[in-house]
Image (cartoon, helix red, strand yellow):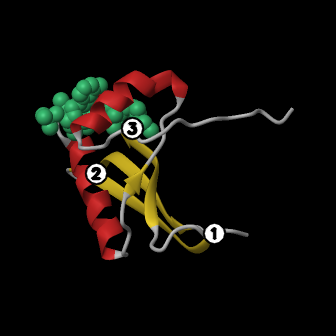
Amino acid sequence: MLEGQLLLGNLVAELDGVVVGTAFLKQLQTHDMSRPVTRITALVVDEKHRGTGIGRRLIEAAEMWARERGSTDLVLSTARENHLAAKAFYEHCGFRCTGYRMNKPLN
Ligand SMILES: CC(C)(COP(=O)(O)OP(=O)(O)OC[C@H]1O[C@@H](n2cnc3c(N)ncnc32)[C@H](O)[C@@H]1OP(=O)(O)O)[C@@H](O)C(=O)NCCC(=O)NCCS
């Protein structure tokens, strides 16, 4: 197993006691990294509350979670179906594309 020091996190945004958004985080460090990074594995805001700043606040909370645990970067990849909207949102929040994701289905 290449991954060491695996840490998982779940952030929740609440409005009047109701969950309106969530982010799942995974801090990982592989053999080629001197320090860990934190991956956002899922981020979703309730449809009725989108566009009100909750997504950005979840990203800010993810940054704090990652920094406190010694991560050098926040990283993520987005699925093809919501790629364009999600990309625009993440760019707005300071993320930049640094490579391509490649995939080979194993049938
Ligand atoms: C992507 C998502 C998390 C954004 O959350 P949100 O709460 O609507 O975003 P915010 O209101 O915090 O927006 C933050 C900033 O990004 C901008 N933004 C949000 N969505 C955007 C979009 N589709 N295109 C361009 N900019 C966008 C906002 O204008 C805002 O800018 P500002 O801070 O300068 O005012 C939400 O739309 C969602 O849950 N989508 C479905 C799931 C998804 O795609 N998840 C991400 C991929 S895993």
Occupied quadrant, residue 30: bottom right
Disc 1 crowd rating (10 Å Cα; few below 14, some 14-19, many 20+) is few
Considering depth in this image, is 71 or 50 the residue closer to the camera?
71
Query: In this figure, which residue is indicated by the disc labeled 2?
Result: 58
Q: Would you say 23 lies left or right of 90 here?
A: right
Q: Looking at the picture, tell me which residue is in the foreground, 42 or 107.
A: 107
Label 2 beta carbon less than 8 Å to ligand 1: yes
Q: Amino acid at mark 2?
A: Leu
Q: In this picture, is 58 found above or below 95? A: below
Q: Nearer the viewer, mark 2 or mark 3?
A: 3
- Specify which label sits upstream in the sequence, 3 or 1: 1
Q: Residue furthest left?
A: 52
Say which label, 1 or 2, has the lower sequence index.
Answer: 1
Residue 86, image x, y percentages: 37, 31
Distance in Å between CA atoms under marks 1 and 2: 25 Å
Q: Nearer the viewer, mark 1 or mark 2?
A: 1
Question: What residue type is disc 3 on?
Answer: Cys
Callout 2: 10 Å neighbours few (<14), some, many (20+)?
Answer: many
Q: Disc 2 and disc 3: Cα gap in Å?
A: 20 Å
Q: Amino acid at mark 1?
A: Glu
